[in-house]
């Protein structure tokens, strides 16, 4: 169920934004003239998990600072059922004026269903500093604008590594190193603390296989390349170094709580979690401890100088059913979120913005609480990020099939080989690939 949220996030970093002094680069390209010339405009924007995902309120507040006559009110949806709820509201005519594109798989469905406005005029105002715009382009038309460009890292608790007497990540790890270290940590830390935590999402494993494997392509219909990744995950689970999938799903474990309250020494997660962790430390929902980010483990040592990871942009599109009088204001908002001012605001709360320049990196690591060690800076600045999802009409169907494969393997209801074989058969019959 959704609800409105109009109060600002209680985050010190967000409260200290100095937007008036930020560069205006990238703020052109949306709307004709003054969107609020006829008086104040109120827009609605959909987001999820607003109490632990501060970026939506930060964007709304920063935009209102730049455009005082336009207010953006947030509407909250479930993080787990976002696309299901949004699809229902769009069909019912009750969806907000603008809505975040949580995944590219979801974007493909919305775009294919005619549920996104053409915002090519906004996209045309950005330069190469705004990353991920092309992900929302279909047949030469752009349907959404990115505000965030995520990459997945390895988060680690330095205090727990020190307690266990285990060497922390150094940027050179392969998956074999990761597995061995997780088991070593688990043996040294005792009950209640695991060596690592793998969240229940299929992307937590499949994203790395897709980006790092030479044959990684979910639209190929050949999924043998997933096998070594699943073998390592099942091994970690069976050894007790990682919470088993059944426990994580049955108990609805939160990855934020697993890492933030020091129940695990390591966790693979997207770059957005930096902002969440900072906010939860501020609110008291997470412990204070020394932590850092390291590159994700690699398939082999050949890519450790420029680590390969994955991550999609997160963007915002406009509901084509928006009141016509608000369309220019909505385009102004999209133009803002892909530009320098929004990037400065997002970087100050630990979000990796779509607009990336040296000034943004400086702002990111100037945030109180963001680790400033050399490895964390290397991890942030040096990597190759492959998209999590290709943009294709059948990608949502394929991802649903691969989600079932993931559940079957990790829950132990099917062997790795049998689950892969079934997924390949289903991809051929249900998605017409392979």
Image (tube, grey):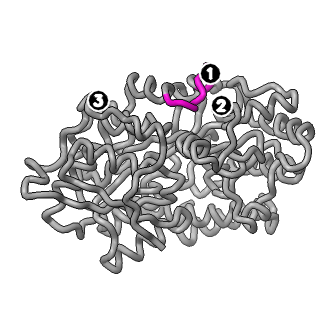
First along the sequence among labels 3 and 2: 3
Judging by the rendered image, the residue that carries numbered circle 3 is: 22
First along the sequence among labels 3 and 1: 3
Q: How many circles with numbers are drawn on the protein? A: 3
Judging by the rendered image, the residue that carries numbered circle 2 is: 292
Q: Residue at x 39, y 42 (%)?
A: 132
Between residues 64 and 308, which one lies in front from this camera angle? 64
Q: Residue at x 57, y 60 (%)?
A: 434
Helix, strand or loop status at disc 1: loop
Where residue 243 sits in the image (x, y, percent)?
A: 80, 54
Where residue 225 sits in the image (x, y, percent)?
A: 68, 48
Task: Mark 3 and mark 1 in contact? Answer it, CB < 8 Å.
Answer: no
Q: Main secondary structure of the magenta part?
A: loop
Instruction: Tell me the distance, in whole angstroms, between the alpha carbons under discs 2 and 1.
Output: 8 Å
- Please say whether residue 61 is one of the residues in the magenta stretch: no
In the image, taking residue 396 as reference, residue 421 lies left or right, namely right
Q: Residue at x 79, y 63 (%)?
A: 247
- Point out the stretch of residues depicted in magenta: 367-376
Of discs 3 and 1, which sits in the foreground?
A: 3
* Residue 41, visible in the rendered structure: yes
Residue 373 is labelled as: 1
């Amino acid at each position: 169920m959704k609800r409105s949220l109009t109060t600002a996030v209680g985050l010190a970093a967000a409260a200290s934004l100095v937007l008036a002094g930020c560069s205006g680069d990238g703020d052109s390209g949306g709307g004709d003239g003054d969107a609020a010339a006829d008086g104040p405009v109120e827009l609605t924007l959909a987001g999820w998990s607003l109490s632990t995902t501060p970026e939506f309120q930060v964007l709304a507040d920063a935009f209102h600072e730049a455009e005082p006559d336009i207010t953006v009110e947030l509407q909250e949806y479930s993080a787990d059922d976002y696309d299901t709820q949004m699809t229902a509201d769009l069909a019912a005519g009750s969806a907000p004026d603008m809505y975040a594109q949580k995944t590219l798989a979801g974007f493909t469905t919305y775009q294919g269903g005619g549920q996104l406005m053409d915002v090519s005029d906004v996209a045309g105002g950005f330069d190469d500093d705004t990353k991920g715009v092309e992900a929302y382009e279909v047949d030469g038309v752009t349907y959404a604008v990115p505000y965030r460009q995520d990459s997945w890292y390895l988060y680690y608790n330095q205090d727990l590594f020190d307690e266990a007497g285990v060497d922390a990540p150094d940027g050179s790890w392969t998956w074999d190193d990761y597995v061995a270290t997780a088991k070593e940590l688990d043996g040294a830390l005792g009950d209640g603390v695991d060596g690592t935590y793998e969240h229940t999402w299929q992307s937590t494993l499949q994203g790395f296989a897709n980006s790092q494997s030479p044959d990684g392509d979910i639209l190929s219909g050949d999924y043998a390349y997933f096998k070594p990744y699943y073998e390592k995950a099942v091994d970690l689970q069976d050894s007790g170094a990682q919470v088993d999938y059944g426990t994580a799903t049955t108990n609805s474990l939160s990855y934020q709580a697993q890492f933030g309250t020091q129940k695990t020494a390591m966790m693979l997660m997207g770059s957005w979690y930096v902002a969440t962790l900072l906010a939860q430390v501020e609110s008291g929902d997470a412990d204070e401890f020394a932590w850092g980010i390291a590159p994700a483990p690699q398939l082999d040592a050949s890519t450790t100088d420029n680590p390969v990871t994955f991550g999609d942009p997160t963007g915002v599109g406009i509901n084509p059913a928006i009141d016509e009088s608000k369309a220019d204001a909505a385009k102004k908002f999209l133009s803002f979120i892909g530009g320098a001012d929004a990037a400065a605001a997002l970087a100050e709360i630990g979000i990796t913005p779509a607009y990336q320049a040296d000034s943004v990196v400086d702002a990111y690591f100037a945030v109180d609480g963001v680790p400033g060690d050399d490895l964390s800076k290397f991890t942030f600045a040096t990597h190759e990020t492959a998209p999590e999802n290709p943009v294709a009409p059948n990608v949502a169907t394929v991802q649903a099939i691969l989600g079932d494969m993931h559940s079957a393997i990790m829950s132990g209801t099917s062997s790795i080989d049998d689950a892969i074989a079934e997924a390949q058969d289903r991809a051929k019959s249900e998605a017409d690939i392979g």
